[in-house]
Image (tube, rainbow, N blue to C red):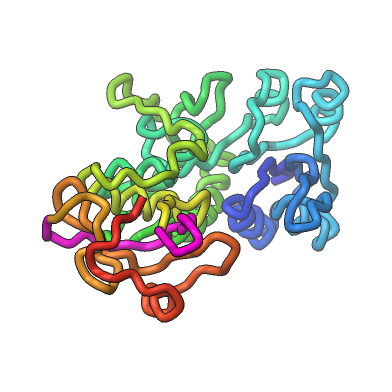
Amino acid sequence: MRLAFLGTPDFSVAALQALVDAGHEIACVYSQPPAPRGRGQALKPSPVHAFAEARDIPVRTPASMRDPAEIEAFRALALDAAVVVAFGQILPRDVLEAPRLGSFNVHASLLPRWRGAAPIQRAIMAGDPITGVQVMRMTEGLDEGPVLATATVRIGASDTAATLHDRLAAAGAELIARTLPEIEAGRAVETPQPEEGITYAKKIRSKEARIDWGKPAEEVDRKIRGLSPFPGAWFELPTEKGPVRVKALLSAFEDVDGTPGAALDDRLLVACGGGAVRLLRVQREGRGPQDAEAFLNGAPVPPGTKLG
């Protein structure tokens, strides 16, 4: 099939790779414009942009797909279908309906649960036991189109946003590669989404990343894992020079009680508002991630230490 691929982050790369491997003709890749990255804040292409360039696939990085010139350029590609995976822009009807067969999205949740920007993080933070990926025909509404294919993925007790991200990306890549031939052959069944059970995965805001030790330990643990590695749930560690911000990147629930925010031993077991969490991997501000044991070698946290 002659396709356009619209995607931006690492999550999208696996699907693009799968389409290339399946022998589809990628007429053009669309991605968000290069953005400042790293310490030097130099403009760098997105992961999808870099992948496409390395394989000599044409790339466009429009600031808006609503630009009439961009719409005309998209129509001129004479596509069979468009595949959209975490592109980062709302697409107008003129773009969605330009390909012969339509436009299809790979979304990382079991719709209608977690429509929107951050389905992976929100599923972990909410304590969902199962999530998945779905191929959906795109409509103008936010993740509201009918579903054509589904793959379910279990969320484990030690899953972080990073580990779940990788499994869902792989599952989504396999699913879209398997579903496109079914769409072309007219065998794919489009199932409208249920009207009940709709939730929205709002974009993660930095202000919600601070840990509230007064919350139940299960909730704190899910927040830590759901925000790992980015933006990273954080707390303040008291030091002789003043409080230092530390990100918690991995944790585990333990059924013991104590004063919320207090260290219950010298191995980063921290009491919450019911139960406790064992911090297994952390990152001190300005330094790299460390396992708890290595972190404690340089910054002991004795029992009774109150974390902010």
Considering only vertical position in the picture, is 40 above or below 63?
below
Residue 142 x, y percent position in the rendering = 52, 24
Question: Residue at position x 17%, y 52% from top?
Answer: 259
Apparent side of residue 166 relative to residue 49 in the rendered image (left or right): left
Apparent side of residue 181 relative to residue 29 in the rendered image (left or right): left
Q: Is residue 274 visible?
A: yes
Considering only vertical position in the picture, is 142 above or below 308?
above
Residue 51 x, y percent position in the rendering = 74, 58
Residue 139 x, y percent position in the rendering = 56, 22
Q: Outermost residue, left direction?
A: 256
Apparent side of residue 270 relative to residue 30 in the rendered image (left or right): left
Label count reads 0
Between 67 and 173, the one lying in front of the other is: 67
The quarter holding residue 19 reads bottom right
Considering only vertical position in the picture, is 71 above or below 280?
above
Considering only vertical position in the picture, is 190 above or below 86?
above
Question: Residue at position x 59%, y 43% from top?
Answer: 85
The quarter holding residue 282 reads bottom left
Q: Is residue 187 visible?
A: no
Between 246 and 158, the one lying in front of the other is: 246
Question: Residue at position x 79%, y 41% from top?
Answer: 33
Between 182 and 162, the one lying in front of the other is: 162
Q: Outermost residue, front direction?
A: 240
Question: Residue at position x 52%, y 44% from top?
Answer: 182
Magenta-span inclusion, residue 255:
yes
Between 249 and 58, the one lying in front of the other is: 249
Residue stretch in magenta? 238-257
Magenta-span inclusion, residue 234:
no
Residue 279 x, y percent position in the rendering = 32, 64
